[in-house]
Image (cartoon, helix red, strand yellow):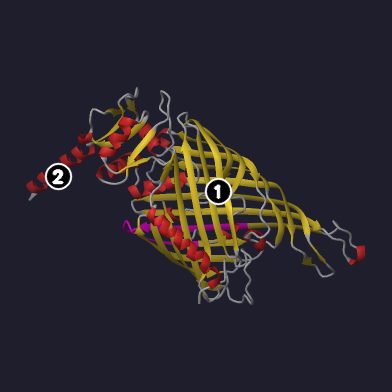
Amino acid sequence: MINRNRLSFVARALGLAALTAIVSHAYELGGIAIHGTLSSTVAYSDKYNFLGATDDAWDFIQNEATVNATKRFDNGLKIAGQVYAYSLSDYSAVTLDFANLDYSFSQEFGVRIGRIKTPSGLYTEVQDLDQVRIFASLPLNFYPRSYRAFAVASDGVSLYGNLGAGKAGSFDYQAFYGYVPDLDDQQPTMLGTNSSGLAPNMIAGGSLIWNLPVDGLRVGYSYYTLYGGALITNPIDIGFGVTSFSGDLGYTTQVASIEYTRGKWVASAEYKYTKTTTNLTNNSALMGGLVPAGSIPNTALNEKDEIYFQLTYQATEKIGVGAYYAYSDYQNSTIDKDIALATSYAIMPWWLVKAEVHFMDGTHELGSAGNTNAGVTEDTWNYYVLKTTFSF
Amino acid sequence: MFRIIIILAFMFGVAATVRAADVVFVVNAQSAEGSLSADDIKSVLLGNKIKWDGGGVIKLAILTAGPVHEQVMQERVQRSADQFDKYWKKLVFTGKGVMPQQAADDAAVIDYVSKTPGALGYVAAASVTAQVKVLTIK
């Protein structure tokens, strides 16, 4: 069974795909290089709705279109921008993914000002870039699609550079500070967190990649913290009344990464620690005013440890295969495990098709995009993903 | 048998030597730049170094395929052509780089470099013309 409600979007996507096929190379207009991608993802689960209506049904869970424009002036100043339009589950939006001015004073030091993508781990910045990997999905819990919009970019400043270290290799660094735009109240992140208002506010962080003298080997560490954030929950029945809660939100994440590329093989592993703090109180007076607004504290600390190991092999120019194992420990509740196998096939250099299967053990992220499941009784379930991407 | 092995080893050795010496980096004929270090070449190819030491933006031209391209990728950036292509897509789609000028063959590289002040490219040594200047790699 296929969800027919989204077929019209798919029809439009196929039309654009045909156009992409015609223009399957980058454009240059007045010295501005223009690139883009278009992709569509369909998924099926044997038991649950995840990122769409996938319970025993194939559903077009995600469609994406990206248009990128870049120009470097003769004085070295670069201007770059990217529009990212997507639908995920029942939500769709057109977003300004990044737009910034970039000036490199030297190899060792440059500055970007504007909307800047958040570097976190090996792949957060390129999570939408299907054509550079074999998997249709990055590890599902480690790089959750439902949280993509959460702190994916900030409006501020970034310092970056590449530092040579002689026989020790080199280091790529980024440090950034900025303001994270508020989230739309219908965004999957909001639905998944049962929130009506989420204002992450300020973000600060950095990323350091060490390119070791061993060819193809790099290790990294990245960190960012959101502070000054505000959260408003949806109304909650707390037994003696219904009220929403609001207050402060804090979020910190740290990722340690290693990636080794040798020939056609790429092996990677990452560990992530995430800490979320909320300090909320009730917005409404309850029990006829006996319990005043602001009198019920709702404080929570949620921590999460995650790790994955991934191996991919580009067997030929057209065919690639990969496998990963991911483990997520939600310290206050459950553990999720995910074993995934994937293959990709390049029909043309600009047209990829992918298939992957996930053998899941754990259900913590099932509702992360707001999808509901009646009677989640079994921890083990399978999830199948097909994806096609056109790029120019 | 041993003699045959020696002859074959010699032939392959010579072939490898010739092949390795076959590729040159070229710049615009008007360029004041005469040399770059191997580290600088790697930094340019990876988009880390975008300016000439004497000033001006380095306008990199790369081949899209072929043995010269494969050789440069392996020797200068220790990547396959496919990995190099993906590396640059990551830079472009994160706002960190401008895709190098892509050329289908040596003649297209020579043409671009000869007409573009600040340009740098690589070609088979046999393809070099008077329109461009060969860069010394220190």
Is A7 placed above or below A26 here? below
Residue at (54, 68) in percent of width and height:
A6
The residue nearer to you, when weighing B100 against A233, is B100
- Residue B100: x and y in percent read 39, 40
Mark 2 = which residue?
B9
The quarter in which the C terminus of chain B is drawn is: top left
Front tag of 2 and 1: 1
Is label 2 in a helix, a strand or a loop? helix
Magenta span includes A315: yes
Q: Which mark is residue B134?
A: none
Residue A133 seen anywhere in this rendered image of the structure: no
Q: Which mark is residue A120?
A: 1
- Residue A345: x and y in percent read 37, 61
Res. A204 image quadrant? top right
Residue A53 seen anywhere in this rendered image of the structure: yes
Badge 1: chain ID: A
The residue nearer to you, when weighing A281 against A265, is A281
How many residues crowd mark 1 within 10 Å: few (<14), some (14–19), many (20+)?
Answer: many
Badge 2: chain ID: B
Q: Is residue A29 left or right of residue B128?
A: right
Give the residues drawn in magenta, as a range: A304-325
The residue nearer to you, when weighing A329 against A241, is A241
Q: Name which residue type carries label 1.
A: Ser
Magenta span includes A42: no
Is label 1 in a helix, a strand or a loop? loop
